[in-house]
Amino acid sequence: MLGLSVIFLAFTLSVVSEETYFVDKDSKLRNFFEPQWYKDNIPFVEIPDKEVEEIYYYRWSSLKRHLRYTVPGAGYITTEFVHKVGYSQKFDTINAAAGHHIYEARWLRNPRYVQDYINFWSREGGAAQQYSEWIADAAYKAFLVNGDADFIKSQQLGFVYNFNSWNNRFDSTLGLYFISPHDDAMEMSASSMQTDDPYHGGLGYRPSFNSEMYANAVAISEIAILNGDDVTADEFRQRADELRASILTHLWDDDRKFFYHMFRNDNPNNELLDTREEIGFFPWRFMVPDENDRKYEEAWEQLFDNQGFYTLYGPTTCEMRSQWYDGNQTSQCCWWNGNSWPYSTGHTLNSLASQIKNYGSTAFANVQNFIQLLHKYAETQYKNGKPYVAECHSPHAKLWVCDGFNHSDHYAHSTYTDNILGDLIGITPQSDNIFVLNPLVLPSWEYFIAENIPYHGHNITALYDRDGSHYGVGSGMHIFVNGQHTGQQSHVGPMQVTIPRPVKYPNFDDTNRMENYAANVDGFGYPMVDASFTSIHASVWHVVDGRIFYDHIPTNRWTNFDSPNPTDWFSLDFGPGRKRTISQIKLYVYSDVATDEGEVDCYISLVIEIFDGKDWVQVQNQISTPPLCANNDVNIIDFTPVTTRMLRLVFTRDEARNHFVGLTEMEVWAPWPQAEYGTYEAEDGWINNADIRESSSASGASYVSRMNDESAFVEFTGVWVNTSGEFNINVHYANGENYATMNVAINNIQDASVTFPQTQSWGLFSQDNFVTFTSSLLRGNNVLIFKRSVGAVELDKIRIAPKHDPSITSTPPPISTPFTSPPTSSHSHKLHSSFKMLFLFEILATKLNW
């Protein structure tokens, strides 16, 4: 029997939050790298089904691999693949599983992971229409967990814009959206195989996409209610209701008792597909079926029918009785006419749980079958006896079919932890100050726990102990809020308690913002990295690419493997003129010695040096945490604050064992921005096809030049305002003797055209050389993308202030400075980006139909 847990105070960023300690965290994390990250971020779960539990912790590790830091101000996104693929978009994102990513990451204690990612889709310029999506729905559901109303309210405009961007896929006659299976992220499906283009064909009205759009509309309506915007709330509630009615009218078959795909072309009678597909279960996840009509529940029989979707490693994506079913593939990607795809299984589990909780149990939709399907899902996620998830799995054999080497590993394309916390444990997030629990567990279970769930800024522990012997706090269900026992009931079932009002995560505003100045999402340009020796199997750019994982395969590291030197260095250059004040470096040290896969391990000693303009000198008061290097973990090195353009790490390796040194990532976190309040430097932005140059007259000692290519742009990220409204934006620049214009995309929602009178000089800047334009900015992080239009402009900085602030007004630039040609300089570096933005939106805010 476990004794009564010790309740202790956990101090995190100046906020005191009380926790419980029932679960032995160290035992759960015994085989995990960087264990403190999990202790700081995830709820700890314990259940009798050990396979389901083991995959729960593994799936947090797989998600962690995909949390990628991009650029200062923009922060984190979630990738789908561990490496870049040809069809990924900005920062290597793909929107197909973005809803899944958000549902998973909403349970992490640090809200930056999910909120930066939501901001990316609503403002940063992510390709939100590349595939079907339910991003607004997922974002609203994330708010229900973290309780940050200010954040979700500020996202409304972006969600409305994204929703209306699908208008060209809407059929007003049927009241349905249409899309191809390919664009619904399901190539080679039963609804495309019977066309002359099995990969891209099958354009039609799908229960998946239309249910997702219904959910997005409901979410926008709910967010508008929070904003007191009755007009938008009513409009999107009506759009949701009409779409729901159309789904039920046109995509449900009363005879075959299922939701079906319906072809758009060559289908004058609007006949439904001849085959059931797993997408027919998706509507329940989003509460589309009529809860007062029991005819819809008959669909669930198919999920447990041996001729339907029920297999050893199912469910299948196509019913097995169909002529289009093929479940015998062994090594082919992207077939959705039989293989079991975690992407769909996550949806189906959500839908099955929704049927049980919101509509009622049936002969097939019940707790026993839910647990059976969940266990089957967990059993699928192994490879060679170890937890693993790839793209798709054989429905009949223990084999990952879509599993590209160094490509599909730990694929982020589905939910699992959300299925455990939200469906199994039954946490039902609310917008008010009520914590609701409705578990789906077997009567035979003697215990379960979800400990220190980050909910509305509080720590909540929910547990069940049949006889009180497992956790030592008495029999039945118990809920602890911030370490205090708050509720108890004798039986397993729905339960709720009142909790305190939401508390925001600390230092998540404009006063104490920290960003990672070492990050380089492009793999070229600045910050620039170099090393005295690099293994042929590694790359220096991996160390600053924002990805952190310690696997031997997939690869993501720099090492000096095979170096003949006892000491090697790794350097970072912020860029011409870009001196940064720093006092800490985080090193994520890679070791394959620890996993018996190689000869790379911890360094014996480390010295941090900075370049003072003439020589490399050691920083003062260097202190490492932990004191000795920890392999496959984060090592934090603090030192006396120093202002520098360049730094380097000098490693001494273990020659006695012939071991070498490796890093998977280096981070340099420091205050953002390093300028006066409201000022953002152009050279700190995300830069495409332009130079960074040094100038003593520039405000940050450098500026952006040579924006000569039509694709050139400077993206100012992380432009923070505390309250949405109208702002004056001063743009400090130089442009020689000719007038020029630039197009500015604000949050990728509205555009402005800015004219720049001639300054008569290049590379020389004055506080008086600026133009002012006015724009609406939204609370939180804003994105301003300056794109070349007519003529050339060199950008120094922008300064923002509320429109009513008299300190920021337009002053014509002087014309007395003699003209000089654009300078050539050894302190410049051309930034050629291979990324081409597919969605540089050119639609004014007035066209949002809002």
Image: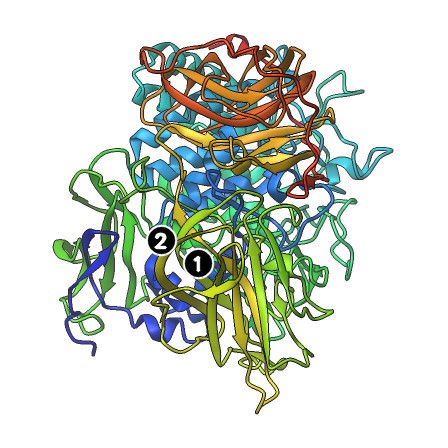
Judged from this view, the residue extending furthest toward the right is 196
Going 36% across and 76% down the picture, which residue do you hit? 627
Disc 2 target residue: 440
Which mark sits nearer the N-terminus, 1 or 2?
1
User: The residue under label 2 is which amino acid type?
Assistant: Leu
- Which of the 4 image quadrants contains residue 759? top right
Q: Nearer the viewer, residue 251 or 794?
A: 794
Q: Nearer the viewer, residue 339 or 256?
A: 339
> On the rendered structure, is 509 left or right of 756?
left
Label tally: 2
User: Quick check: 673 above or below 596?
Assistant: above
> On the rendered structure, is 495 left or right of 388?
left
- Where residue 602 sits in the image (x, y, percent)? 51, 78
- Where residue 66 sits in the image (x, y, percent)? 54, 53
Instruction: Describe the element under mark 1 as helix, strand or loop.
Output: helix
User: The residue under label 1 is which amino acid type?
Assistant: Ile
Going 49% across and 71% down the picture, which residue do you hit? 632
Q: How is the image coloured?
A: rainbow
> On the rendered structure, is 825 left or right of 374?
right
- Where residue 580 sits in the image (x, y, percent)? 45, 47
Judged from this view, the residue extending furthest toward the bottom is 656
Q: Are marks 1 and 2 in contact (CB under 8 Å)?
A: yes
Disc 1 target residue: 371
Instruction: Describe the element under mark 2 as helix, strand or loop.
Output: loop
